[in-house]
Amino acid sequence: MDKIKIAIQKSGRLSDDSLKLIKECGIKFNNGMGKLKAVADNFPLEFLFLRDDDIPGYVEDGVAHLGIVGENVLVEKEKDVDNVKLLGFSKCRLSIGVDRNWDYKGVQELAGKSIATSYPKILKGFLDKNKVNAEIHEISGSVEIAPSIGLADAVCDIVSSGSTLLSNGLKETEVIMKSQAVLIANKSLNAEQQDILDKLIFRINAVQEGKKNKYILLNAPNESIDEIISLLPGMKSPTVLPLAMEGWSSLHSVVKEDEFWDVIEQLKKVGAQGILVAPIEKMII
Ligand code: ATP
Ligand code: MG
């Protein structure tokens, strides 16, 4: 069988979670420190470890068939690739930061100012949309120190907690885009490559669904079962098994992670006892 190549960031804020996702998909491989390539043992996948900036271009050219990259880099690079799936990690935003003593009132204040960024295209799009004429100063790293060394009046940079801005005397004033990791694919995969991608997406979906849900087991008196079932819709309907103790049953079901605490409270109110909640590794719906 053909293998397909996936480009993953060599080392940085996408690397660990990208590799973790691959492992959670049951794909085994050995990535020795500093290696630029690896091959999966039990899935037709080869890994290329690259700088994230290069990933969209390599996927467009077909050097890699797939890639994992931040939406911020994907949008900035303007490469023609398929945006296959949002992956939910490396969440951050691309924002404007200005000196914290600047009494900033709105985007018009950026007119005539210089803004340092590694994202000139996204920034230009934002400024054009707001009809603001500012000077874009492209630099490739350490953007946040630009104002303090007199290189620019403001920055347009990646923010997650905001602590980097803060420690450089800056404050966040405009969020230009929100970003997370995304799986991208070359636009002209052949049938066999598409088939491998479909298998990978199937596994990623199962991992993501599993994370969104919890497996729940509880004991309840038989007279509460109907009420409990109405609180626990489950995948179809809950499993109900008789307990050795007369008049009691055990119920098994699945609840959404984000509804979980509310449901637990309600279950206790209607008589549920011995509630166990377990993580779900994979869930196929
Ligand atoms: P490379 O050497 O591969 O070019 P880099 O220095 O450009 O790496 P990183 O800082 O590792 O990039 O960030 C990679 C991506 O992770 C960013 O493009 C962004 O999508 C996301 N990211 C950046 N900072 C954060 C953060 N603090 N929290 C979450 N995600 C982030
Ligand atoms: Mg980079």
Image (cartoon, helix red, strand yellow):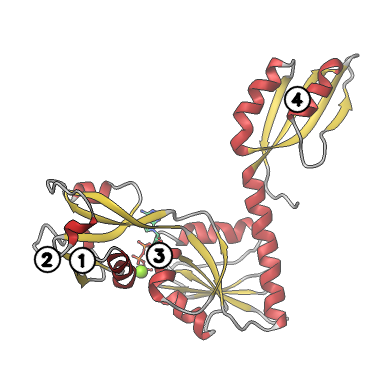
Disc 2: which residue: 151
Indicate yes or no: mark 3 CB to ligand 1 under 8 Å: yes
Amino acid on which disc 3 is placed: Asn
Question: Would residue 123 appear left or right of 178 to someone viewing this image?
Answer: left
Quickly name the residue at label 4.
218
Q: Which residue is mark 3?
A: 72
Q: Amino acid at mark 1?
A: Ala
The answer to whether 273 appears left or right of 132 in the picture is right
**Disc marking residue 116:** 1
- Crowdedness near tag 3: few (<14), some (14–19) or many (≥20) residues, C-alpha within 10 Å: many
Amino acid of disc 2: Leu
Q: Is residue 181 above or below residue 37?
A: above
Judged from the image, the secondary structure of the residue bearing numbered disc 2 is loop
The Cα atoms of the two marked residues, 4 and 3, are separated by 44 Å
Q: Residue at x 70, y 50 (%)?
A: 282
Q: Nearer the viewer, mark 1 or mark 4?
A: 1
